[in-house]
Image (tube, rainbow, N blue to C red):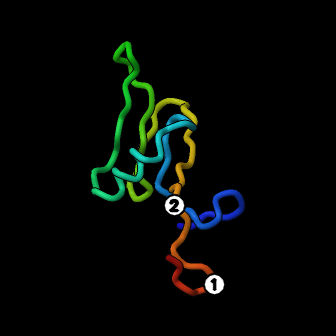
Amino acid sequence: MSGTGDNAGKEFLGVATSADFPVDIAQRQIDNGWGVYEIDGDDGSLKSVFIPADYSMHITAAPRVFAIWSNATSPTAGGLETD
C-alpha cells in the first residue's frame, strides 16, 4: 500500500505501539519476513511492538497504534524508472 500526502511514495510497513518506532527495524522485519518485533525498555518492560502490515492482531487493552511508513520513496515517477 502506498501513502499519500506527507507519505506519498512511501510504502506502508505496518503499525507500532509507539509513534517513534525505528523505521529501519520495521523495514528489516519486512525485508526478511521476520514478523512482529518487540523493543524492551532499560527496566525490561515492553516499550513498543511492531506488527507488519500483513499480520493480524488481537489487542486486549486500549493501546494506540501508529502507522509506520518506509523511508524510501517509490522507484518510479510518472511510470518511468528512476535511478
Under mark 2, the amino acid is Ala
- Choose between 18 and 6: the one closer to the eye: 6
Q: Where is residue 48 in the image (x, y as percent from the top left)?
A: 45, 32
**Rendered position, 21 above or below 31:** above
Q: Quadrant of residue 37?
A: top left
The outermost residue toward the front is 83
Cα–Cα span, label 1 and label 2:
17 Å
Helix, strand or loop at mark 2: loop
Which of the two labelled residues, at mark 1 and mark 2, occupies the earlier sequence position? 2
Q: Position of residue 50 (x, y in %)?
A: 42, 42
Q: Where is residue 12 in the image (x, y as percent from the top left)?
A: 52, 59
Q: Does residue 3 appear left or right of residue 61 in this picture?
A: right
Under mark 1, the amino acid is Gly
Helix, strand or loop at mark 1: loop
The label shown at residue 72 is 2
Residue pictured at 35% horizontal, 51% vertical: 28
The outermost residue toward the bottom is 79
The label shown at residue 78 is 1
**Rendered position, 83 above or below 9:** below
Specify few, some or many for label 1: CA neighbours under 10 Å numbering under 14, 14-19, or 20 or more: few
**Rendered position, 47 above or below 70:** above
**Rendered position, 82 above or below 4:** below
Specify few, some or many for label 2: CA neighbours under 10 Å numbering under 14, 14-19, or 20 or more: few
Q: Where is residue 42 in the image (x, y as percent from the top left)?
A: 38, 16
Residue pictured at 38% horizontal, 18% vertical: 45
- Choose between 30 and 73: the one closer to the eye: 73
Q: Does residue 9 appear left or right of residue 14 in this picture?
A: right
Residue pictured at 54% horizontal, 70% vertical: 74
The label shown at residue 51 is none
Residue pictured at 54% horizontal, 32% vertical: 63
